[in-house]
Amino acid sequence: MCIRDRLITTKVQVESLAGIPTLSVKTLPLTGFNAFLKRVFDIIFSLVIIIVFSIPYLIIAALIKITSKGPVFFKQERITENGKKFIMYKFRTMVPDAEEGTGPVWTKKNDARITPLGNLLRKTSLDEMPQFFNVLRGDMSVVGPRPERPYFVERFKSEVPKYDYRHKVKCGITGWSQVNKLRGNVSIEERTKADIYYIENWSFFLDIKIILRTIFEFLFHKNAY
């Protein structure tokens, strides 16, 4: 069976209509009170992280300015819930204008565009810390599918079955696909399946589980480059 056939929703139920069995899609769990609960958690969690890491933020910003030319923050347009575009913030880890002459490309292992400090920030995922401001603003969630650029979203929508299903929820700093070693240069089909599983099986405790796994796995993932 090809990957296109396997990438179908599992949240279906059998109903009877005039004695005839029919399939219908169940309501996704991340709605109503659950969506409110997740948003409240996002606000509290991101505020705590921003306050606790305020001094490290300043130290990293200073080191970026000292060790390389260019801005402290890297800003890039990404796609989140319902296809909405937003500006995502990270600490800059590459030389300025890294994609000049190439257009949109993914980062690769031993990428020459990454600065020495940027390499350390990526391996420890400290470059992602400014995204908590995106969470506080409501563009992102702490947990959710990884945000992608419009260029790649349009490309993957035509290549990967149900890829756009990922945008039924807000994108996240970490997620089910990331903690299951589907980060970096891996199969987009497998990453999409993991994201769909998360969307259809969301619970508050699943988010907590992902966050705890992130602490032990995500920060030291071998594919973080």
Image (cartoon, rainbow, N blue to C red):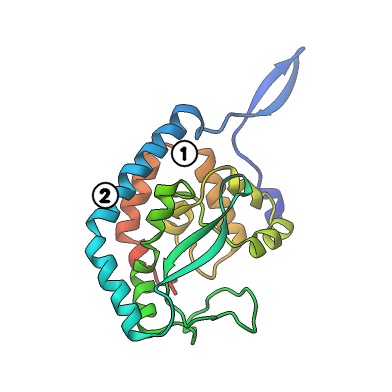
Q: Quadrant of the C terminus?
A: bottom left
- Distance between mark 1 and mark 2 Cα atoms: 23 Å
Q: Quadrant of residue 208?
A: top left
In front: 160, or 35? Answer: 35
Crowding near pointer 1: few (<14 within 10 Å), some, many (20+)? some
Residue at figure coordinates x 38%, y 61% from the top left: 130
- Residue with the mark numbered 1: 202
Q: Secondary structure at mark 2?
A: helix
Q: Position of residue 43 (x, y in %)?
A: 36, 43
Q: Secondary structure at mark 1?
A: loop
- Residue with the mark numbered 2: 48
In front: 61, or 154? Answer: 61
Relative horizontal placement of residue 97, taking residue 74 as reference (left or right): right
Residue at figure coordinates x 41%, y 38% from the top left: 38
Relative horizontal placement of residue 197, taking residue 156 as reference (left or right): left
Relative horizontal placement of residue 169, taking residue 208 as reference (left or right): right
**Three-letter amino acid code of the residue under disc 1:** Trp
